[in-house]
Amino acid sequence: MRIGYARVSTQEQNLELQTDALKAAGCERIFTEKASGAQRDRPELTAALGHLRAGDALVVWRLDRLARSLKQLIETVEALAQRGIGFVSLTEAIDTSSTGGRLVFQIFGALAEFERGIIRERTLAGLSAAKAQGRVGGRPPALKPDDLVAARELLSDPSITVDEVAARLGVASSTLYRHLPGGRHGLAGC
């Protein structure tokens, strides 16, 4: 069975071009959606994926109708393949039930992996350059040295709880414990 999925990004756009193409391609059921591809929660796509059974094929008009990124597209098609479900994109003439279609998808997978590797290399190079210039990445510490001094002073008073100290400093208790392992008992002389 061929199951179609059509999507447009806005309410003003028309699904007719896609649904006509999906009907012509022999889709017995078509799920339609008006939602941005960036949205992870697409109920009609979820319904279409749930409707598919081994031996079926998910058919889309164009690759970008199914997924926003190449990585997301490959993950979706691989998940379909694991369930014994084919994938067809009409515009790009890809059909993963054929040897040629699987080859095209393997090339896409290799390109996606290459892209991830390039991004990782650039990120590491950027971090190294920043470190060489004396810049440190990451979030600023939640507690400054003066805050830690104040926390130690407050914790030396047994009538003040760790939760109260954390509240006064505007941080979570877990943050205080991370900076002062053992809390009150971890302080020297307590």
Image (cartoon, helix red, strand yellow):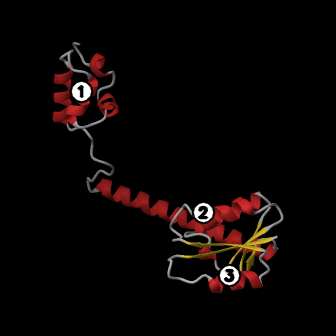
Q: What separation in Å lies between label 2 and label 3 (alpha carbons)?
A: 18 Å
Query: From the viewer's perspective, is residue 36 above or below residue 164?
Result: below
In the foreground, 32 or 154: 32
Q: Are marks 1 and 2 in contact (CB under 8 Å)?
A: no
Q: Upstream in the sequence, badge 3 or badge 1? A: 3
Q: Position of residue 44 (x, y in %)?
A: 63, 66
Kind of element beneath mark 2: helix
Q: Amino acid at mark 1?
A: Glu
Q: Viewer-nearest of labels 1 and 2?
A: 2
Kind of element beneath mark 1: helix
In the foreground, 159 or 98: 159
Q: Amino acid at mark 3?
A: Thr
Q: What separation in Å lies between label 3 and label 1 (alpha carbons)?
A: 61 Å
Which residue is identified by label 1? 164
Which residue is identified by label 2? 43
Q: Upstream in the sequence, badge 1 or badge 2? A: 2
Task: Residue at 64% x, 61% y: name it.
Answer: 46
Which residue is identified by label 3? 19
Q: Is residue 37 left or right of residue 162?
A: right
Q: Amino acid at mark 2?
A: Pro
Task: Residue at 57% x, 64% y: name it.
Answer: 42
Task: Residue at 77% x, 58% y: name it.
Answer: 83
Residue extending farthest top:
189
